[in-house]
Image: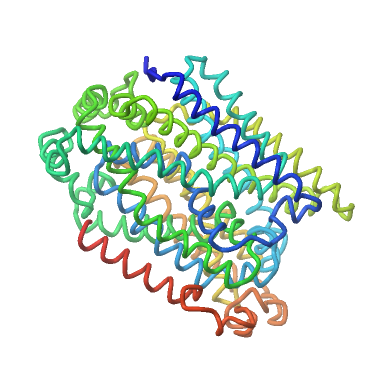
């Protein structure tokens, strides 16, 4: 059984972190007097705060355990999740889509769907989003419980409940502000934890040259030292098919579907004080995002050649993909911390992992309570009550989501690589939503009936592809099935939307102002003082620099 050899200094550092987390929640509570304060921080936060929170909210199970597991299993092709599968979509969100979200004064992404397509698409989006957030919160909660389990030796179910209570405490107290300010703190703690782990791990393995030699000698082979064409990741034997799968399935459909329509991320940008600040939020987040793989993916690769348990597990999986053992790739980072970090640094590392999973779960829960309260409860169940009623509803929804996440946490425990599970969820929920959004935002003829029918058909088609993969109708190793499901969902959504549009009535053009690009005056998409901003606050320039950097990383590192 994996246990970390923590000393009192390590426990003290973890305890100190919890004191700060709960203290921030208590202080944020003092600023909550309305539902907008609780759900959107009063739309008052600066861009640098929301930019760091934007990226920290994603630094949960997806980033830390999922990407390190991917690094251990696939190696350098995992970089695609950052340089192809994140940064371009984040820049697109900031430049193209945030002016519509923020300028229309919507409180959530489903509310934007309501204004553009009416109640049908709105209800489908709100329900699917709520379900997805509870499932993904369960992933973060399961990994939070795992940390307490290996640290304290508590049974997993006790660890999961204790972790849930801690996150529930500060979100219920301070709402989105508590989540965002904790996410800023958590960002720096995560970096402080993972950077030393990477450096110590590289030193132990003999530097980059030593890592390269051991990867070549190991069961992954030299293919894991190059991001392209990434055949092991996609499951395609053809290099061309693999590149198409990465660029279209991951880089376009899954990536744009996640980053541009996922309210967990968009909510942080909506908490800012202006359109310009909202646009800068994902762009600021793109800068640390492109360098995070060096402290997440590389440790996974080191673990796969340095830690005997992970080395053995990888060799067994290479010979028999159905091998089941006590070790999984999800534990790669924990084993490396156990082997590489001395006491003191181990406490920082543990605090960093706890920070990551708490940031991820808090982001899921704070987005869930907003959508549940505004888009489901207020819209369809109890209308026209005083603001305080919906504030109380949001706090109750927070408790409900946390309890539900305790149940879904144990679904996540069935997956040896957490990214397999998460990419499956994203192909179900995010890929068709992006198709509906992008078509509806740039094609004014698209009708309300097409909005909801395209969403339903796209989601259903992704589920069909997943079932076909599970029942061996076709076989793809790696995460290729999720890439195919996402591509099919996108294509089916577009096709159904076009067909239904030609069979139904569009909304009048006057009702599309602020919702469709061609019908929205340009001055509604910018702040009045946008032209007088200093260069470092201009979204287009910041996005251009980030794009050049990520292209350079793809060329010279990938």
Does 162 appear above or below 180? above
> Is residue 30 rendered to the left or right of residue 494?
right
Which of 25 and 9 lies nearest the eye of the viewer? 9
Query: Can residue 498 be seen in this snapshot?
Result: no
Does 222 appear above or below 238? above
The N terminus lies in quadrant: top left
Does 241 appear above or below 143? below
Query: Can residue 290 be seen in this snapshot?
Result: yes
Please report the residue visible at 26 percent of the width from the left and 32 percent of the height from the top.
303
Which of 545 and 323 lies nearest the eye of the viewer? 545
Please report the residue visible at 75 percent of the width from the left and 50 percent of the height from the top.
31
- On the image, the x and y values in percent for residue 319 come to 19, 27
- On the image, the x and y values in percent for residue 395 come to 75, 40
Please report the residue visible at 64 percent of the width from the left and 83 percent of the height from the top.
528
How many numbered marks are there? 0
- On the image, the x and y values in percent for residue 394 come to 75, 44
Does 6 appear above or below 227? above
In the figure, residue 84 lies in which quadrant? bottom left
């Amino acid at each position: 059984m994996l246990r970390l050899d923590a000393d009192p200094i390590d426990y003290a550092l973890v305890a100190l972190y919890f004191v700060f987390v709960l203290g921030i929640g208590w202080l944020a509570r003092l600023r909550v007097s309305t539902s907008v304060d609780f759900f959107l921080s009063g739309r008052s936060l600066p861009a640098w705060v929301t930019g760091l929170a934007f990226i920290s909210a994603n630094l949960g199970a997806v980033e830390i355990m999922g990407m390190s597991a991917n690094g251990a299993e696939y190696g350098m092709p995992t970089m695609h999740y950052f340089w192809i599968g994140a940064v371009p979509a984040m820049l697109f969100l900031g430049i193209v889509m945030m002016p519509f979200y923020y300028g229309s004064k919507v409180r959530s992404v489903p509310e934007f769907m309501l204004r553009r397509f009416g109640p049908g698409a709105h209800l489908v989006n709100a329900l699917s989003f709520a379900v997805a957030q509870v499932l993904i919160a369960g992933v973060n909660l399961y990994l939070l419980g795992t940390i307490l389990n290996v640290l304290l030796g508590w049974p997993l179910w006790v660890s999961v409940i204790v972790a849930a209570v801690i996150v529930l405490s500060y979100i219920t107290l301070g709402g989105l502000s508590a989540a965002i300010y904790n996410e800023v703190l958590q960002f720096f703690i995560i970096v402080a934890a993972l950077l030393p782990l990477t450096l110590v791990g590289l030193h132990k393995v003999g530097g980059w040259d030593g890592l390269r030699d051991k990867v070549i000698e190991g069961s992954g082979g030299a293919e894991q030292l190059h991001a392209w064409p990434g055949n092991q990741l996609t499951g395609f034997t053809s290099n061309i098919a693999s590149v198409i799968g990465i660029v279209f399935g991951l880089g376009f459909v899954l990536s744009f579907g996640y980053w541009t329509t996922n309210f967990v991320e968009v909510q942080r940008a909506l908490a800012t004080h202006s359109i310009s600040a909202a646009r800068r939020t994902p762009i600021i987040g793109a800068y640390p995002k492109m360098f995070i793989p060096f402290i997440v993916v590389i440790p996974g690769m080191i673990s796969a050649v340095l830690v005997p348990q992970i080395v053995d597990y990888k060799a067994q999986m290479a010979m028999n993909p159905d091998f089941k053992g006590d070790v999984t790739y999800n534990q790669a980072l924990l084993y490396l911390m156990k082997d590489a970090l001395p006491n003191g640094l181990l406490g920082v590392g543990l605090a960093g992992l706890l920070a990551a999973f708490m940031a991820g779960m808090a982001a899921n829960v704070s987005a869930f309570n907003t959508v549940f309260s505004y888009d489901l409860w207020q819209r369809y169940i109890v209308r026209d009550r005083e603001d305080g009623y919906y504030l109380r509803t949001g706090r109750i929804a927070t408790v409900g989501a946390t309890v539900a996440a305790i149940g879904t946490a144990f679904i996540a425990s069935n997956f040896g690589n957490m990214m397999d599970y998460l990419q499956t969820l994203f192909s179900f929920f995010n890929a068709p939503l992006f198709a509906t959004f992008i078509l509806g935002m740039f094609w004014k003829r698209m009708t309300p009936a097409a909005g909801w029918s395209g969403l339903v058909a796209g989601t259903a088609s992704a589920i069909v592809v997943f079932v076909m993969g599970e029942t061996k109708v076709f076989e793809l190793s790696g995460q290729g099935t999720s890439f195919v499901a996402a591509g099919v969902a996108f294509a089916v959504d577009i096709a159904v939307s076009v067909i239904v549009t030609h069979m139904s009535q569009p909304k009048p053009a006057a009702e599309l102002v602020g919702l469709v690009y061609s019908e929205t005056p340009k001055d509604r998409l910018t702040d009045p003082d946008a032209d007088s901003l200093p260069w470092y606050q201009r979204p287009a320039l910041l996005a251009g620099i980030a794009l050049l950097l990520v292209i350079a990383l793809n060329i010279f590192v990938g």
